[in-house]
Amino acid sequence: MAPRWKWKGAEAKAFAEPISNTVSELQSSLSQTEASGFLSSCNVLLSVEPEQAELLDRCCFGRPVVCAEKNKRWIQLTFEEAFFLFYKLKCIDKISLQSCYLENEVDLWRSMRSFKPNFAMFYKAYSHLRSKNWIVRSGLQYGVDFVVYRHHPSLVHSEYAVIVQSIGEYNRLRVWSDIHCSVRLTGSVAKTLLVLYINGKVNTENMNLPLCLDDYTVEEQTIRRWSPELSREDETRT
Amino acid sequence: MAPRWKWKGAEAKALGEPISKSVSELQLALAKTESLGSLSSCNVLLAVDTEQAELIDRCCFGRLVLSADKVKKWIQLTFEEAFFLLYNLKCIKISLPGRYLEDEVADTWLYMKSKRPNFPMFFKAYSHLRSKNWVLRSGLQYGVDFVAYRHHPSLVHSEYSVLVQSSDSDRLRVWSDIHCAVRLSGSVAKTLLTLYVNGNFKEEDLNLPVCLEKYTVEEQTISRWSPELSREDDTKISKPTVSHLKTV
């Protein structure tokens, strides 16, 4: 399916400002001010300057939290977003949990994994897509794990509805009714169902280190309905 | 959600011919001729005459199979439909080509169970709703196990999309699946209904259909709760006509 741009000129605007550029800008801006975040059992709160909040919004990381502070902006990040900024882009300096700082990635990784048991595979999937410059957001309202956008959600509709599966530990698509359910719902919102299979030693000691991420592989698979009428070879196609 | 009748007069027609009555007529008509169903690994083929075929269609059991046979009509039944006719309504006989069935009911049960391990709980759910005179059909195209109609599908749209659940279910294990099922059900104007079939599935008495008596079925609907539509004051926003939101 071709990308659905939201307004005339949106595609041109997207071409002129690639996500990769905006991410680099964000990276240097955040590194300069040694941004720090606060970890809770379900998200990370990041305190930033107004200009940085604008950059975060342009790259689509997190959601702004309404607050009364005039000089600072607070952004609520998911674990995946926060870990990506911390570990991959290296632009968050430290994250504190309650009253102590988690300065290295190992502590942060372990904390997040203790709060969210399937964090490892979700993060692998998230960073796999983000590294290809897809914008990744929660897909819960569409009955999936993530939805991915080719560019900013204000310019384009998301194209893929993503379900993350770990080899050997399936919670979705175990039976035909779920496959039909997901494909039908995904189709009704003009998206393609994409399943990311995360392969790797998911349950060994290495799991305690984010380095284990290098051991994982990601296999992409789209699932669509096949329509005989639309797949005929002859010229007189409907 | 109120039942959606398909045409003006459909509701009156339905009220005039309750499903329970058609089922009794079917029961008598089939028992008289000792109708025989032929069991295969995935369904049961039943040979009937024209009047019986019409009654079966009125009660919505099975699907008519196109055939060149001028005398008989052939109906393809699911395991649940066939076993319901065999065990609950006691109006058909079953044969398994190439095998002699000593105890028709018990042997059919064992055979169906061997082909589909989840057959016992699916049948419990099927008979639970059929006994209440709901018409049941496959829900696969809606991403569920069954869809339930208040009367014949030519008169009314199905109201419930049904998922059969037990302690080790393959559906609704995570929130994304719950949202998926609720949203899809709502988009086709149905309420998601889960039937929890409780019982001891691993014991030996599963070999006999009497084990069905020991199962209980717990019904639970899952729908979205909308704060706006659930306020208590008088100045309520009127409900949209096509909506997947339901007040609980």
Image (cartoon, helix red, strand yellow):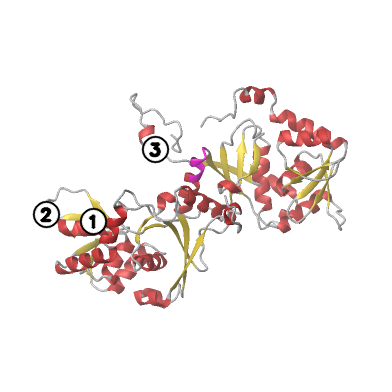
Q: How crowded is mark 2: few (under 14 residues within 10 Å), some or many (20 or more)?
A: few
Q: Name the residue under label 3.
A: B226
Where is residue A158? Give x, y as percent. 38, 54
- Viewed as shown, does residue A218 lie left or right of A55? right
Question: Mark 3 to mark 2: distance in Å?
Answer: 36 Å
Q: Which residue is drawn at 60% across and 59% down?
A: A233
Magenta residues: mostly which secondary structure? helix
Residue A26: quadrant of the picture: bottom left
Same subunit, labels 1 and 3: the answer reads no
Same subunit, labels 2 and 1: the answer reads yes
The magenta segment is: B184-189
Chain where mark 1 sits: A
Give the answer, above or below, for where A137 lies relative to B50: below
Q: Mark 2 points at which residue?
A: A71
Element class at badge 1: strand
Question: Mark 2 to mark 1: distance in Å?
Answer: 13 Å
Q: Nearer the viewer, residue B187 or B236?
A: B187
Q: Does the magenta stretch include residue B39?
A: no
Work out which quarter of the rendered image holds the N terminus of chain A and state it: bottom left
- Viewed as shown, does residue A69 lie left or right of B164? left
Element class at badge 2: loop
Element class at badge 3: loop
- Viewed as shown, does residue A145 lie left or right of B88? left
Q: Could you tell me if residue B90 is visible in this image?
A: yes
- Amino acid type at circle 3 is Ser
Chain where mark 3 sits: B
Q: Mark 1 points at which residue?
A: A75
Same subunit, labels 3 and 2: the answer reads no
